[in-house]
Each structure stands twice: as C-alpha cells, then as structure tokens.
Amino acid sequence: MAQATKTKGSTSTQSLLHAAISASGTKLIEQIRHLVEIESPSDDKAAVDRCADAVAETTTGIGGRVVRHRQRGFGDVLELRFGFSAKGGGGCAPLMLLGHLDTVWPLGTLTDMPFRIAKGRAWGPGVLDMKAGVAMGLTALAALSETEALDRPVIFLLNGDEEVGSTVSRAITEKLARECAAVFVLEPAQGPGGAYKTARKGVGGYTVRVKGVAAHAGVDFERGHSAIHELAWQLEKVRGFTELDRRLTVNAGVIRGGTRTNVIAAEAEAEVDVRIARAKDAARIDRKFRSLRVRDRGCVLHVEGGMNRPPMERSRATVALFRRAATFAAQIGFELGEASTGGGSDGNFTAALGVATLDGMGAVGEGAHASHESVVLKDLVPRTTLLAEMIRTS
Ligand SMILES: [Zn+2]
C-alpha cells in the first residue's frame, strides 16, 4: 500500500499533511458555514437533498467520485469514493467514514439561530451534530489527496435519516461496511474534552397499549374498565425492568389516554425507551415486555416494538483503533480521552457487524439538538489532522 518514499511513518508526508490542514483552517470554517446555512431537517427530502448537492459538488472538486443512492421518502444517501484509482487501493479493503446530513432542526430555524462566530465557537443549527464533522471529513480527504498521502480507498458515506432512526439508510450502511476494514464515525466527540467513543448503548422502543371499557365515572362506575389504571399498573412492572448493574435502562417517556375526568378511560398507551449495553440483553428485555399480562380482565393489553440499534460494544479492534488515535493525538499536541455513551449512532450498526468502529471523531462542542449548539474553533484543525492521520495510517 504505502510506497517506499512515502512510508506510513514518514515524517515529511506527515508534516506536509499537517501543514495542508492548518492552511485550510479558514476554508474549513467557511465550509461549515455553507453546510449549516443549507437547512436539512430529516423529514424534508428536498432540503436534505440540497445539502447533499452541496457536498457532492465539493467532493467532485477535490477528486472524489459521487455515487448517489436515491431515496423516495428521505434525503438521498451519498457514497463518496476516494482513492479508488488505479494507483491506490488495489486489493486493499476500503476504510469507511460515516456521517449524516440531516438535522433535528426544522426549516426556518436559521432566522432565530443564524450561523455565527462568537466566543471562540461557531454556532448554528446542526453545526455540532454533525455538519462540522462532515466538513472535517471532506477537509481531511482533500488534504490527503493534495499531499498525495491517500494510498488506500475510502468510502465517505452520508445519509439523510439518521436523526429519525436510519430506517432507509441502514441497509446501505451495513452492505458497504461489510466490505470495509474499519469505520470512523464523524459524530461529535464526547464532552468538553472531546473524547472518542468506543462504546454506545443499543436503543429500542416499545409501545404498551391498553384498551378498556368506557363508562360514566359517577353513574356506571362498576361497568367500566379503566385503561389508564391498567396502564399505570403495567408501567410499574415496566419500571422494574431497569437493571442498572447491567446498564440496562427503561424509561416511559410518553403517555397518553382518556378523554375526561368523569369518563372511565377506554384507551391509554405509553411509549417506552430501552437502552442496553450488551447485545444479548435485547432478547432478555424483549421477553420481559412480551410477558406482560393484563391484570384487569376487562382490559386488553397490546405490546409492540423492539430494538432499533444494537449496542456498539467495546471490542478489541475498536480499542486498538482508539490507542493508535491517542498516540497520534499526543504527537499533534493534545490528550485524547476515551468514552462510552448511552446515545446511539449509525456506528452501532457497523460495530454490530463485527467491523472495527471508532466513533466521536467529529467536532468538539456542546448543545447538540439544543439552542446553544456550537463547536469549538480551536479544536477543528487538530481534530481534522488526527482524522487525516488515522485515514493515512489505516
Ligand atoms: Zn448525529
């Protein structure tokens, strides 16, 4: 893979690469601004596609090839291919960079939350999660080609439905990831220290629905069967499913039911979020939900749901990637921490396939999905340099 004059440890290639990224610092911030200013809520295909158009244009400009997986209901999935030329990549499995273009912010958010630079940060909807990460990936790849340091194929995969569960992109992500040597996820780094993530919890959801029998609460009390009281009883059982020592948690986050105080409720339902740290707990928690039995026999209980994202477990291969990254970070001049998180990403899918996956390789900042969403400017260049080093030496 690496040529004799350009071995993996070559300090000259390394310093050329670092210089190229430092020189593109201003351009990187401009690119982040450009992407943030193309609003792209997951539920608006046309908007997400406009963002994809911009990324496709940049990709072509830096020598990448764009494969567009067209979608009906969501934004198109972009497969950006770099280093697949005759020169590089022969027989070498590609590396995957993984991210998403959609955000949780509706169109028009920019009016109240415009892109701005202040207090050493860039602010705006989706800037941290994860448009800065996308711009960092493109900048790293541009610098690698510019300095002729890219001697392996890279697939940069970007979808438009991550924030709503990746239902359409999951199959594409999994298919391509199976062919890849490793996956680098450009989601935000963890916390103010910007740790990389080597483990993520799996995420699932269940709906517990009760049908009761309506009756007048004053006149016909004994003929009624309250869906609300039945659901409340079921939720007490569900609460008991949490096992903190296994890092398995259950949370009824949404509840609905009933019509008026003087009516015994005919219907009630709750939406329950489930987080698991170990893949084998998926079956365990599913069994528990399926074993719920109605207490008031005048009611009917219905449970549906399951796991959406399997957990990303802290595998040996992932830890090896992290250790290499920490060594490079020290050379670049910062200390890289390791973290796990309860939140899921598309890295959960690739890790569950057994492909070494390192996550949190995007920007450092705070306030993802919140009005103070921002990225720290001074971390952009060192983090992008680290990303480029990891691509170069993988
Ligand atoms: Zn994200």
Image (spheres, rainbow, N blue to C red):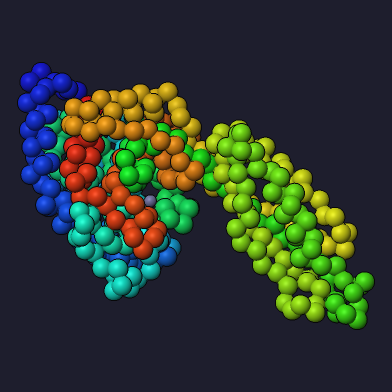
Determine whether, in the image, residue 78 is placed left or right of residue 172: left
Choose top left, top right, bottom left or bottom right for residue 208.
bottom right
User: For residue 270, what is the image quadrant?
Assistant: bottom right
Residue 105 against residue 239 in the figure, above or below? below
Residue 170 vertical placement versus 15 (above, below): below
**Residue ranking furthest to the top:** 4
Q: Quadrant of residue 211?
A: bottom right
Image coordinates for residue 353, horizontal then vertical, percent: 46, 33
- Residue 328 lies, in percent from the top left, at 22, 28
Q: Residue at the front extreme?
A: 119
Q: Quadrant of the C terminus?
A: top left
Q: Residue at x 93, y 71 (%)?
A: 222
Asked whether residue 89 is in view, the answer is no
- Nearer to the camera, 193 or 86: 193
Please state if 101 lies on the left or on the right of 138 as rendered: right
Front residue of 32/75: it is 32
Q: Image point 32% across, 41% down: which residue?
A: 194
Image spot of residue 107 (x, y percent)? 35, 71
Please indicate, yes or no, whether residue 9 appears anywhere in the rendered image. yes
Q: Is residue 254 left or right of residue 1?
A: right
Residue 276 in picture, x, y percent from top left: 57, 40
Q: Quadrant of the N terminus?
A: top left
Which residue is located at x 53 percent, y 41 percent? Answer: 202
